[in-house]
Image: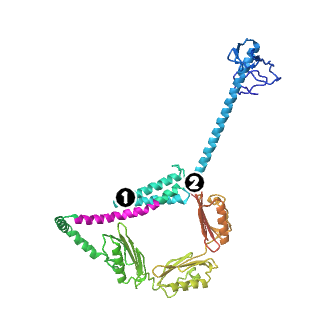
């Protein structure tokens, strides 16, 4: 039983509340309570039953409006107490109802806030692990370089555009991280697209900066008086005499050593020799216009660089009759730089003899050609054959197939890869400068293997394990080669990994799969051929 006034629990048999002192409102006949007779007050004018006001000695009839003084006695006092208790009980009930309503409203608000928090947390996680976030970060770095380049060139309009691009990308990031609240969706993507589109006005204003300089110089020359022009010319002649002489000496000595002597001369504002030996020349020349670049191509062609020539807008590649390889690359921006690379032909050892190691005996011999042995061990053989043609490549690939390299074959016009029945792997590829590169690997040593029960390996599904070779085994990374796994086993295992949650930013090809799970777990699975798969799981949280 509870107190009708304060809600406190009443002891059995109590007649008054021990908390507030209010009388216990017991049911009729309940033990511990004396039955009290109810007193009715009727109006003397109309006979209507009137309720006593516990705080007033006067009765008021709500029908006829008459009033009369109450004669105080025991029954009246009891009725006054009952009336007061009833009113207090009603007030207490309203307060309790109001309190419960407030609690319910707070619970609803808390649930809504928690739901909003979880939704935003999920959206932020998806954004930070998505392509848009990564692209935006890359663009911020690129636009930062744009800003520095434009500022150094005093292209202030281009600088302002680049700064605006950075601001748009940063605002996009803040929107994606919910630091700035957005009403509509997709605003982050729109800002990044807008920043990328501003690249075109950036380039236009950046190039216009130099065009304006040229026009300003012409205008200044037209506006200058004849006297000022003559004075300026005489001053330049006197002050620049020594520098002209030095420039003349420099032009005469340009491309006068190393492999650069096989190049035509060219004039520029600055020359930088990255490499200039008897085997290779790598030279950058600044201040070369596109017209000069086009003329330089003609000069190179006159010197015999016309074999297998490929000419594009800003590039030119060709060989000469002796096998020298030329590559020209022109950058028509502020520095107007021309990159020149010239490589001597790779002749190889004229006394080259095909090696006789264990691996080499698995391969057909490449005869009557010069070559270079780069690696010759029990595990790996690397050989470069020189002065060869595409027909030589096709013939050698055919020989490899004839001696048994026909398992898990991957073949095109430039590269051939295959295994033989003993697990030896060969790769034959066409290189530059009329060369063919041959690489052979011995079978990987596999031993009986048990899948780990601790460490990063427990984060991924258990694959088909019989034999294998462990590459890395630390508390943050585990990698292994597993034998006896076909391409079908590879695909089935990849499906298991995706089902296990490795589906963030994943890439899947015929023989390769990579994916993330959350922010810290990175998985790579690859079918390497000859019924072998490679697995690498990294837990960057433990790194």
Q: Marks 2 and 1, how far apart in space?
A: 37 Å
> Mark number for residue 125?
2
Where is residue 350 drawn, in percent x and y?
Answer: 45, 85
Camera-side residue of 186 and 348? 186
> Callout 2: helix, strand or loop?
helix
**Disc on the earlier residue, 2 or 1:** 2
Point out the image quarter for the N terminus.
top right
Magenta span: chief secondary structure? helix
Where is residue 440 drawn, in percent x and y?
Answer: 56, 77
Position of 290 relative to 538 (above/below): below
Camera-side residue of 411 and 424? 411
Where is residue 172 drawn, in percent x and y?
Answer: 50, 54
Camera-side residue of 98 and 34? 98
Q: Residue drawn at (63%, 69%), measured in percent from left and top?
A: 533
Q: Which residue is mark 1?
A: 157
Position of 382 relative to 120 (above/below): below
Badge 2: few (under 14), some or many (20 or more) residues near its Cα, within 10 Å? some
Relative side of 313 to 534, left or right? left
Camera sees residue 484:
no
Relative side of 126 to 266, left or right? right
Relative side of 107 to 2, left or right? left
Magenta-colored stretch includes residue 47: no
Where is residue 280 drawn, in percent x and y?
Answer: 39, 76
Q: Which residues are magenta?
A: 195-222
Q: Do tag 2 and tag 1 residues touch (Cβ < 8 Å)?
A: no
Farthest-out residue, right: 29
Badge 1: few (under 14), some or many (20 or more) residues near its Cα, within 10 Å? some
Position of 219 relative to 81 (above/below): below
State which quadrant residue 148 falls in: bottom left
Magenta-colored stretch includes residue 203: yes
């Amino acid at each position: 039983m509870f107190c009708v006034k304060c809600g406190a629990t009443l002891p059995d048999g109590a007649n008054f509340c021990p908390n507030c002192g209010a009388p216990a409102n017991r049911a009729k006949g309940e033990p511990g309570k004396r039955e009290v007779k109810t007193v009715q007050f009727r109006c003397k004018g109309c006979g209507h039953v009137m309720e006593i006001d516990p705080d007033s000695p006067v009765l008021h009839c709500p029908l006829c409006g008459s009033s009369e003084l109450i004669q105080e006695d025991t029954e009246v006092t009891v009725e006054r107490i009952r009336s007061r208790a009833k009113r207090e009980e009603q007030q207490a009930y309203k307060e309790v109802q109001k309190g419960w309503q407030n609690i319910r409203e707070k619970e609803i608000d808390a649930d809504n806030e928690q739901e909003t928090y979880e939704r935003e947390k999920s959206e932020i996680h998806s954004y930070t692990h998505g392509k848009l976030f990564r692209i935006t970060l890359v663009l911020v770095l690129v636009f930062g370089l744009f800003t520095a380049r434009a500022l150094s060139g005093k292209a202030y309009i281009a600088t302002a555009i680049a700064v605006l691009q950075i601001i748009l990308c940063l605002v996009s990031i803040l929107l994606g991280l919910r630091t700035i609240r957005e009403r509509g969706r997709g605003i982050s993507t729109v800002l990044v697209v807008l920043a990328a589109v501003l690249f075109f006005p950036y380039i236009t204003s950046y190039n216009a900066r130099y065009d304006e300089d040229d026009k300003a110089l012409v205008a200044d020359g037209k506006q200058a008086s004849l006297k000022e022009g003559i004075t300026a010319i005489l001053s330049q002649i006197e002050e620049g005499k020594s520098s002209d002489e030095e420039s003349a000496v420099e032009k005469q000595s340009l491309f006068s050593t190393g492999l650069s002597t096989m190049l035509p001369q060219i004039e520029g504002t600055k020359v930088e020799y990255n490499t200039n030996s008897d085997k290779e020349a790598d030279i950058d020349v600044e201040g070369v216009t596109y017209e000069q670049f086009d003329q330089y191509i003609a000069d190179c062609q006159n010197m015999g660089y016309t074999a297998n020539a490929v000419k594009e807008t800003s590039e030119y590649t060709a060989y000469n009759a002796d096998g020298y390889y030329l590559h020209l690359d022109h950058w028509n921006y502020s520095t107007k730089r021309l990159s020149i690379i010239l490589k001597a032909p790779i002749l190889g050892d004229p006394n080259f003899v095909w090696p006789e190691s264990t691996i080499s005996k698995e391969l057909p011999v490449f005869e009557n050609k010069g070559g270079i042995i780069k690696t010759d061990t029990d595990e790996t053989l690397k050989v470069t054959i020189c002065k060869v043609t595409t027909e030589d490549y096709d013939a050698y690939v055919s020989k490899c197939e004839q001696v048994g390299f026909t398992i898990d074959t991957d073949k095109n016009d430039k590269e051939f890869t295959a295994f033989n029945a003993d697990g030896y792997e060969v790769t034959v590829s066409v290189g530059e400068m009329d060369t063919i590169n041959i690489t052979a690997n011995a079978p990987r040593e596999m031993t009986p293997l048990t899948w780990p029960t601790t460490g990063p390996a427990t984060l991924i599904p258990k694959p088909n394990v019989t034999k294998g070779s462990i590459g890395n085994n630390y508390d943050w990374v585990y990698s292994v080669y597993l034998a006896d796994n076909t391409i079908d086993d590879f695909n089935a295992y990849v499906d298991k990994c995706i089902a296990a949650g490795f589906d963030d930013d994943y890439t899947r090809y015929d023989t390769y799969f990579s994916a993330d799970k959350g922010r810290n777990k990175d998985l790579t699975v690859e079918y390497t051929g000859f019924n072998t798969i490679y697995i690498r799981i990294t837990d960057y949280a433990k790194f």
